[in-house]
Image: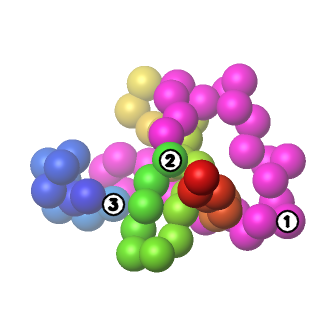
Amino acid sequence: MMQEYSVENLNDIGCFVVLDDSENQLFEVAEMEFTEVLEIGNLHYLHGVKILSDSYGEDVYLPIEVQKC
């Protein structure tokens, strides 16, 4: 991720918030710049980016269960 954003430390791009599944009400989709589903290993996360100011944002991750049909 640091290579993707071309930064030397994570303080330069904001913060990362990892919620547990009981904190799903804290993931406000309307507040996110965008959302996507990420697969990391065998786990799936709803990932959103919330822009807080011109140079600061939050990456928010909420674990989800993906149902495959």
Q: Is residue 64 left or right of residue 28?
A: left
Q: Position of residue 22 (x, y in %)?
A: 85, 65
Task: Give the camera-side residue of 14 and 19.
Answer: 19
Tally of numbered discs: 3
Q: Residues within 10 Å of mark 1 (few under 14, many from 20)?
A: few
Q: Quadrant of residue 45?
A: bottom right
Residue position for label 2: 37
Sequence order check: which comes first, mark 2 or mark 1? 1
Range of residues picked out in magenta: 11-36
Q: Given the image, on which type of amino acid does mark 1 rest? A: Ser
Comparing labels 2 and 1, the label whose residue is closer to the camera: 2
Sequence order check: which comes first, mark 3 or mark 2? 3
Q: Are marks 1 and 3 in contact (CB under 8 Å)?
A: no
- Name which residue lies at 58% across and 56% down: 68
- Name which residue lies at 26% across and 58% down: 1
Q: Is residue 14 left or right of residue 12?
A: right
Residue position for label 1: 22
Q: Is residue 61 visible?
A: no
Residue 22 sits above or below residue 68 on the image: below
Alpha-carbon span between mark 1 and mark 3: 26 Å
Query: Is residue 35 highlighted in magenta?
Result: yes
